[in-house]
Image (cartoon, helix red, strand yellow):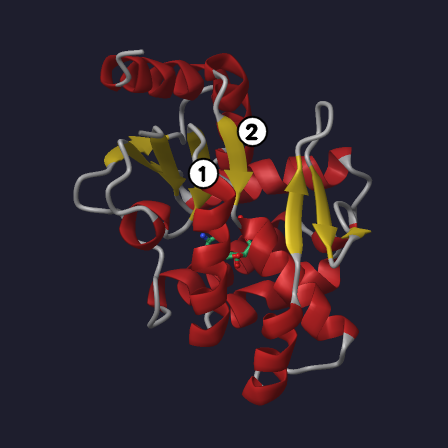
């Protein structure tokens, strides 16, 4: 039986960095499920299909091919055979993805894609609904959290490091609050801690401290 670790939580908790480090330490396949929603959003934007055009979205979903190629240090994301690893991080995708991710037809497609990607592997998956919807029987479930102020602070610093200087701290904080509202209040698969998930507040913790905590939890559960 494959071993499954589910890491859920809002953006800005260090989820991606933490998941990647744990996957390397414990030799688990790393699946960042946000990329599936980002690819679907990009394809809709490319085809000028809005969130209200459900039939057109359905057509797009019927033919879409999303792949994570685990090449070298950084996973490469392919949408219909095109490398979109950087493109899915652009602002247009960023500001629209939460709307597409709230649609039932989109989630009904993304969930089986995720399960397929994980099939027959020992995996660590990060997202919003892994422990609640995608793998409710995961061996380890972690819910990462962090104060909104600290999440904004981290995102603001990250933006500056990446040469993005057009947003003030207050704007970044406002974006985070809005996104959180959309994700936690959506009807389908809202961002919520699974009852049996272990809650970790990362506000005052260093990345390594969180990684070590989770690695120890996994090692206790995984007997091989
Ligand atoms: O983790 P991220 O920021 O790359 O996620 C992109 C979007 O997809 C974000 O709006 C949350 C959504 N998402 C989701 O609804 N369910 C998941 N399992 C993963 C991401």
**Labels 2 and 1: the sequence-earlier one:** 2
Q: Determine whether the residue tagged by mark 1 lies in a helix, strand or loop.
A: strand
Q: Which residue is drawn at 69% across and 82% down?
A: 49
Residue 92 shown left or right of residue 52 in the figure = right
Query: Within 10 angstroms of label 1, few (less than 14), some, or many (20 or more) residues?
Result: many
> What residue is pinned by disc 1?
125
**Residue 58 in the image, given as x and y percentages of width and height:** 57, 80
Find residue 80 and name its label.
Answer: none
Residue 138 shown left or right of residue 93 in the figure = left
> What residue is pinned by disc 2?
17
Q: Residue at x 51, y 29 (%)?
A: 29
**Residue 55 in the image, given as x and y percentages of width and height:** 57, 88
Residue 95 falls in which quadrant of the image?
Answer: bottom right
Residue 8 falls in which quadrant of the image?
Answer: top left
Residue 16 shown left or right of residue 205 in the figure = right
**Residue 92 in the image, given as x and y percentages of width and height:** 73, 64
Q: Residue at x 50, y 70 (%)?
A: 106
Q: Determine whether the residue tagged by mark 2 lies in a helix, strand or loop.
A: helix
Q: Where the N terminus falls, by quadrant?
A: top left
Cα gap from disc 2 to disc 1, whole angstroms: 12 Å
Residue 181 visible in the snapshot? yes
Residue 133 shown left or right of residue 35 in the figure = left
Q: Where the C terminus falls, by quadrant?
A: top left
Query: Within 10 angstroms of label 2, few (less than 14), some, or many (20 or more) residues?
Result: few
Q: Is residue 177 above or below residue 45?
A: above
Front residue of this view, candidates 12 and 102: 102
Cβ atoms under marks 2 and 1 closer than 8 Å = no
Please state the total of marks drawn on the protein image: 2
Residue 166 visible in the snapshot? no
Judged by depth in the image, the label closer to the viewer, 2 or 1, is: 1
Front residue of this view, candidates 180 and 174: 180
Q: Residue at x 58, y 36 (%)?
A: 154
């Amino acid at each position: 039986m494959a071993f499954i670790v589910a890491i859920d939580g809002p953006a800005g908790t260090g989820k991606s960095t933490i998941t990647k480090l744990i996957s390397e330490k414990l030799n688990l396949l790393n699946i960042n499920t946000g990329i599936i929603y980002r690819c679907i959003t990009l394809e809709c934007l490319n085809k000028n299909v809005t969130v209200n055009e459900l039939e057109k979205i359905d057509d797009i979903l019927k033919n879409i091919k999303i792949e994570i190629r685990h090449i070298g240090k950084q996973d490469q994301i392919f949408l219909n055979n095109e490398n979109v690893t950087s493109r899915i991080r652009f602002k247009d995708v960023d500001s629209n993805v939460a709307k597409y991710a709230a649609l039932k037809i989109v989630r009904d497609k993304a969930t089986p894609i995720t399960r397929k990607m994980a099939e027959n592997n020992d995996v660590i998956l990060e997202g919003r609904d892994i422990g609640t919807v995608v793998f409710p029987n995961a061996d380890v479930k972690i819910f990462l959290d962090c104060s909104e102020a600290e999440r904004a602070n981290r995102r603001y610093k990250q933006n500056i490091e990446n040469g993005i200087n057009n947003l003030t701290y207050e704007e970044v904080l406002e974006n985070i609050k809005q996104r959180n509202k959309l994700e936690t209040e959506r009807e389908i698969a809202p961002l919520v801690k699974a009852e049996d998930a272990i809650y970790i507040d990362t506000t005052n913790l260093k990345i390594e401290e969180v990684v070590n905590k989770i690695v120890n939890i996994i090692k206790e559960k995984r007997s091989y």
